[in-house]
Image: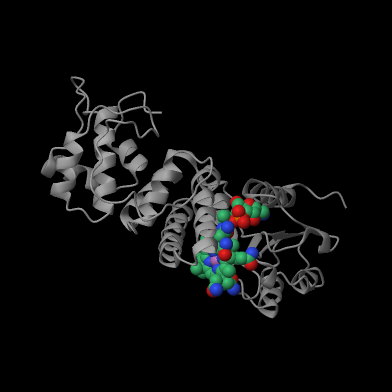
Amino acid sequence: MVDEALSAGAVARRLGVAVTTLRTWHQRYGLGPSEHVPGHHRRYTPTDLARLEIMRRLTAEGVSPAEAARWARQAPDPMPTGTAAPGRIHPPGRDGGGTIPVGRAGPAARGLARAAMRLDAAAISEAIAHALATGGVVATWEGLLRPVLAGIGERHAATAGLIEVEHLVSRCVSEALAAASRAKVPTGPARILLSCADEEQHTLPLEALAAALAEAGVSYRMLGARVPVNALVEAVNRTGPAAVVLWSHTRATADPAQLSALLAAPRRPLLVLAAGPGWRADSLLTGVVRPVDLAEAVSLAAAVRDSLDQPRRD
Ligand code: B12
């Protein structure tokens, strides 16, 4: 619920548009913030937000900005969130070309979903970068990225569409996570090896893990997508990692032989993590651990790294 005046950044996130777009709508079409507290930046009131919501929806439907702004300026004071009350104006156009379901996720996820549907890469990247900077990697993954990615998957499964949205969002997520990882490069030897299973192209969860490890100060080495088992074992033998995280997103790439090969490697890691929904819990070998989520994967990897820093008793 909107119960207080908002900054430009907060409004941009709620609407899923870039701050620069808001600025243009203000300067060109007079749809700016109307609350003015002396000595502070102007703030957007609920009425301003409702007008901008109309502007966003109509422009997304292809109505020209000037025409959309005319409708937006006519809007009466807003009703409680989510209501389409009688008496509200009914501007031209349909109610959007479909949405990405985000379940119970908050306004930032809904904003990101809208930006995704418009293929607005600037707004998508801005929303992710802001979440990473303010909430950190795990919260951004769980509260923002995971719901939107799962929603895209759901819509795709139902309609066979949205492939362009899936690709653009994936790219923006990758770039934002890589930037977050680069911003905090941990020192010390890389004792955690991250790899996708053979033929596995779903890398984003592993990229989230990499960024979360960087944030936690844990060094890692990332092999990325589609790593054949021989190459994985070669990397293990050459680098001697304490833990290997092997990601599989679908049953098709979850061949347990890859896990057996890790356990049989001459430089067998202390911990093998079979991560991702591809792995069947009941088919995992002794010595293989299956994390339930990102936070658990981070803490298991950090614990192994820390155990190496303890004096050995044997
Ligand atoms: C983005 C995406 C892609 C991108 C990936 C880009 C990239 N760089 O990663 C691209 C376009 C490449 C792609 C390709 C394909 N995709 Co795809 N893709 C997705 C999508 C939308 C998001 C993937 C993702 O990152 N999910 C992350 C979260 C949302 O997944 P989750 O299941 O909730 O994961 C939780 C658990 O795993 C748990 N967890 C447990 N342990 C750990 C450990 C860690 C470290 C973490 C982070 C989490 C964790 O927590 C996770 C959430 O945090 C999914 C939809 C979905 N629901 O996942 C489809 C989806 C996975 N894809 C699907 C398919 C079919 C494909 C293709 C076969 C399509 C095709 N015909 O080519 C190819 C497969 C290529 C291959 N061989 O790997 C299907 C899989 C169906 C199935 N179960 O077999 C899905 C489910 C979409 C659908 N509903 O149809 N895809």
Ligand 1 found in image quarter: bottom right
What residue is at 21 percent from the left and 28 percent from the top? 42
What coloring was used for the rendering? one colour
Q: Is residue 236 left or right of residue 141?
A: right
The residue nearer to you, when weighing 106 against 245, is 106
Q: Quadrant of the N terminus?
A: top left
The residue nearer to you, when weighing 201 against 208, is 201
Image x and y of residue 200, in percent: 61, 71
Based on the displayed image, in which of its 4 quarters is residue 80 positioned? top left
Above or below 270: residue 197: below
Image x and y of residue 152, in percent: 49, 57
What residue is at 45 percent from the left and 66 percent from the top? 161
Q: Is residue 69 visible?
A: yes
Count of residue discs: 0
The residue nearer to you, when weighing 216 against 25, is 25
Q: Is residue 289 left or right of residue 141?
A: right
Q: Is residue 131 visible?
A: no
What residue is at 17 percent from the left and 43 percent from the top? 69
* Residue occupying the far front of the picture: 86
Based on the displayed image, in which of its 4 quarters is residue 107 positioned? top left
* Residue occupying the far right of the picture: 314
Image x and y of residue 31, in percent: 17, 37
Image x and y of residue 70, in percent: 14, 41
Q: Is residue 232 left or right of residue 185?
A: right
Q: Is residue 130 left or right of residue 201?
A: left
